[in-house]
Amino acid sequence: MNQHTIEEGKSLAIASYLTFIGTLIALFMNLEKKNPFTNFHIRQMIGLILMLIVSNVVEKFIHSWLGTILWFFTFGSWLYSIIYAIKGEAKLIPFIGEKFQEWFAKLGE
């Protein structure tokens, strides 16, 4: 990605990390532009939303401590991701970010 592409998609990439509604807004606003930097961060955030749902289900139905650990991992991953979006970098979330990019590759195309 070149610097122009990053600067053009940076605001929507950051917006995608501001709640589920921000993700939807960024997704729909980026459908026309198809900015790869924004798409990268939208895919990461959709993965984080799914991780949050899983952590809540685990906490409620399986084991509260395991769910809490998953929630903290999700929150830390969210912080990591939004910081790199602000910096204008496309860094994968450790351990699972590559899978998010694979699973949601068709999103936004």
Image (spheres, rainbow, N blue to C red):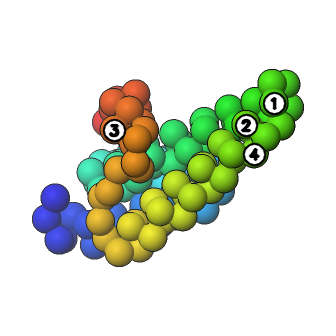
Q: Is residue 52 left or right of residue 76?
A: right
- Do residues under tags 2 and 1 come within 8 Å of each other at their CB atoms? yes
- Looking at the rendered structure, the secondary structure element under dot 3 is helix
Q: Nearer the viewer, residue 96 or 65?
A: 65
> Which residue is at a point 35% across and 75% down the rendered structure image?
87
User: Which of label 1 and label 3 is nearer to you?
Assistant: 1
Residue at the extreme left: 2
For disc 1, the marked residue is 63
Q: Quadrant of the C terminus?
A: top left
- Looking at the rendered structure, the secondary structure element under dot 1 is loop
Q: Amino acid at mark 1?
A: His
Q: Amino acid at mark 2?
A: Leu
Q: Quadrant of residue 17?
A: bottom right
> Which residue is at a point 13% across and 65% down the rendered structure image?
2
Q: Is residue 65 left or right of residue 81?
A: right
The alpha-carbon separation of the residues under discs 2 and 1 comes to 5 Å
- Looking at the rendered structure, the secondary structure element under dot 4 is helix
Residue 99 percent location from the top left of the image: 38, 32
Q: Earlier in the sequence, mark 3 or mark 4?
A: 4
Q: Earlier in the sequence, mark 2 or mark 3?
A: 2
For disc 2, the marked residue is 66
Q: Is residue 48 left or right of residue 43?
A: right
- Do residues under tags 4 and 2 come within 8 Å of each other at their CB atoms? yes
For disc 4, the marked residue is 68
> Is 82 rendered above or below residue 46?
below
The alpha-carbon separation of the residues under discs 1 and 3 comes to 27 Å
Residue 97 percent location from the top left of the image: 39, 42
Residue at the extreme top: 62
For disc 3, the marked residue is 98
Mark 1 Cα-neighbour bin, 10 Å: few <14, some 14–19, many ≥20: few
